[in-house]
Amino acid sequence: MDKKDLIAHSPVRYFDVTNAGLKDGEMGLITAKKGLGKTSILVQFGIDSLLNDKALVHVSFDQQSSNVIAWYSSVLAEIAKKKSLNLDDVNEEIVRNRTILNFNQETFTLPKVVNTLKALKDGGTSIASVVVDGLDMNKTSADDIKCFGDFIKKEKMTAWFSFTNEAADLKGTLAADKLDNFATVAHLAAEGKVLSLAILKNGEGKVSLDAKTLLMTKS
């Protein structure tokens, strides 16, 4: 099995059509109500980075490492199953290039995460992409978000965040001084039996999610 096959069939290719993908140095935000599929979307972005040989750090504020690992295994298996691909050659490489960090927001702020990422880099860990899941943006200051964004920009990384929020418009998502730090904002919502990820900032259109697998798919 050629890794190029997995890249070509990555669910993120459906997201690419919206032109809302991140460039180096940019951050993106995925919002939705609790339990709808934000983590799955972030994991899909993470897997796509790993398949493209971009070392990833997954930061979780609401799940243990074992749960995060299970997400990656499940999403990767679903991608492979759709195209009858064998994962044996890829799993080891993905695990080798992925670092998972768990923090408690009550005691660990985004600037502290930046310090941890700097320490990892100084210790020889390569980092090209970051996903931050489970952070309550309402309890995070605009200055802290900017601090993280400045680091991502300086290091030419990309970073995807999730945020539990039901607003379907940009104005209702976050205060302007926080939103300014994100190049892309997209909102996941249920439309009848269909899950749809709508681009609110940077790009246009919607991406459907398979209600069973939570993979991004053709609209």
Image (spheres, rainbow, N blue to C red):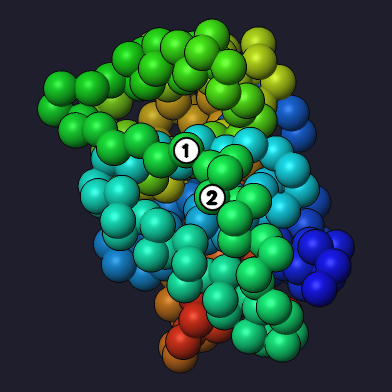
Query: Mark 1: which amino acid?
Result: Thr
Q: Residue at x 57, y 44 (%)?
A: 96
Of 188 and 119, nearer the camera is 119
Q: In which quarter of the view is residue 128 placed? A: top right
Q: Position of residue 110 (x, y in %)?
A: 35, 21
Q: Residue at x 56, y 23 (%)?
A: 125
| Residue located beneath label 2 in the image | 95
Q: In which quarter of the view is residue 54 placed? A: top right
Of 177 and 78, nearer the camera is 78
| Residue located beneath label 1 in the image | 99
Q: Is residue 22 above or below residue 165?
A: above
Question: Which residue occupies the extreme left position in the image?
Answer: 106
How far is the residue under mark 2 from the one under mark 1?
8 Å
How many tags in the picture? Answer: 2
Q: In which quarter of the view is residue 124 placed? A: top right
Q: Secondary structure at mark 2?
A: helix
